[in-house]
Image: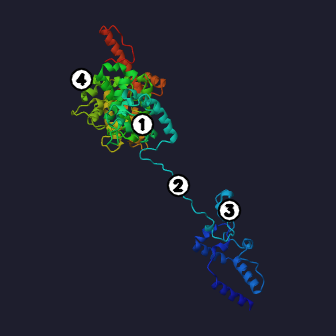
Amino acid sequence: MNDNKMADTDVVVAESLPALDTEMLQLSEVSPFALSSNVGFVQRIFDQWLSLPDTDRLVKSFLHDANAGLSLNVSSNSSSTISAAGNSMPSMFPAGSTPPLSPRSTSGSPRVMRQRVGPSNFGSPLKVVSKPVKESIPQFYFQNGCPPSKEIKEKCLSKLNQFFYAYPEGLKIHAFKLVTREICKLPSFFSTALFRKIDINEIGVVTRDAFLDYWVYSNMMTMDTASQVFGILKQPDLNYLTQEDFKPVLRELLSSHPGLEFLQSTPEFQERYAETITYRIFYYVNRSGNGHLTLRELKRGNLIDAMRHADEEEDINKVLRYFSYEHFYVIYCKFWELDTDHDFLIDKENLINYGNHALTYRIVDRIFAQVPRKFTSKVERKMGYEDFVYFILSEEDKSSEHSLEYWFKCIDLDGNGVLTRNELQYFYEEQFHRMGCMAQEPVLFEDILCQIIDMIGPENESYITLKDLKGSKLSGSAFNILFNLNKFMAFDTHDPFLIQQERENLTLTEWDRFAQREYIRLSMEEDVEDISNGSAEVWDESLEAPF
């Protein structure tokens, strides 16, 4: 009888169960918020818990006590009692299978904080979470640059007042150089360009207010130096620099630098010097090679540092990057030696003579096919001075990325972006033939190919990519093997003079060492010529021009 009554009671309880209250589960392993946000999943877990044998016995025990009129000692307002009873209930997780919580500090745990703040553990966790506080994000982008702080502005005004105190009507161009260097912190040979940028009405003076409007109130003073230089040099309607934009600063450099005073009597060579500096700047800094030097390229290059160095160093030949007069002298003289008719143009036959016939005909053909770079010369099948500057910088410093790109395009016959065995063999065939004509023991191409692969270490040994070349320090020697016989032989025999020169100064580039050797050679030839002509003075000043 009692068993039938218990069965009937089970059916009634099962049918009259209310909706599951997730907060009544009292699961210490799972947060209340996670339970309330996944009711369906919790309901299935709860059903599974009810089906456990231990749970069945526990529920029947409660029902038996209820039928007998015994107190269950369960109160909905007593969390401690329910917790104690809950601890005796079977866990829904099998023993040892509970996933561990991530380690955290109890002082900063959101679960611990909720338990401490709320009056009851049965309350919704959303009630104790504070509303998100709105945070005001300070402005971090300024179209015209970040405005200067009050302290910086006052310091600038104080210095500015000192400069303009004796010139209430404004500064003329000759007195503006100190402002450029002391207040703007720019190379002094930027003073003319900056002066003309401010003096838009061309009245010949820059007033204090005009300078403040341009330098302080337009936020120029808080920009980085590259942005300042870019803004001063570029044309108003363009977002890039051209070669023409560098002429004003180079013209002032030539007229004011103590290391270039000797050129003032030869204006034609002043112009050639400025041209050469500009070509070198665009060769190294204008990585896109389109003649439009962007602000991004200017920031990534080392031109600003070189300009500062040129402004601070009295010996211009110590400024190896871009500005060395000796470097210009070598480039110009090498061009002049090839330009036999002195029309300032050289053809294919002239270039074959470069470096004592070092280059192969096949590589010269590729250069004059304008594969690595389109000629700026307007004369067909003729190379101009600018084109020659790009060539000689690429030929004599094959460690630079621009040089590797230049020669990669030459060797890549089909332009598919990889160098294959057939392409390498095509250029080496002429080298092989030339070695035989010079009574040198020629090296078979199979051996050369293995050597090049070992030198470059490409990702795929069946071809070589530009990335492979840029990742190897011996890429320049690999190119010499293919089309420069003199450098190939020097590399193969490990020329002790070259090795010693490299060890003497590790900071010098291949171009620096080449220019150093050539300048010594050219200056010695000039000395011999002076003596043979009966000159009373022997030219022994390293800074004196032979022109």
Q: Earlier in the sequence, mark 4 or mark 1?
A: 1
Q: Say what amino acid the circle numbered 1 marks.
A: Gly
Which residue in the structure is indicated by mark 4?
342
3D distance between C-alphas at marks 4 and 2: 69 Å
Q: Position of residue 387 (x, y in %)?
A: 29, 32
Label 4 vs label 3: CA separation?
A: 89 Å
Name the image quarter holding residue 484: top left
Image point (40%, 21%), residue name: 258
Which disc number belongs to residue 301? 1
Q: Position of residue 107 (x, y in %)?
A: 68, 57
Q: Nearer the viewer, residue 536 or 509?
A: 536
Report the residue at 36% width, 15% height from top.
524
Q: Earlier in the sequence, mark 1 or mark 3?
A: 3
Mark 1 vs mark 3, foreground winner is 3
Q: Counting residues from the N terminus, which is met first, the one under dot 2 or under dot 3?
A: 3
Q: Position of residue 435 (x, y in %)?
A: 33, 27
Sequence-first disc among 4 and 3: 3
Which mark is nearer the camera, 2 or 3? 2
Circles 2, 1 touching at the beta carbon (< 8 Å): no
* Tag 3 residue: 112
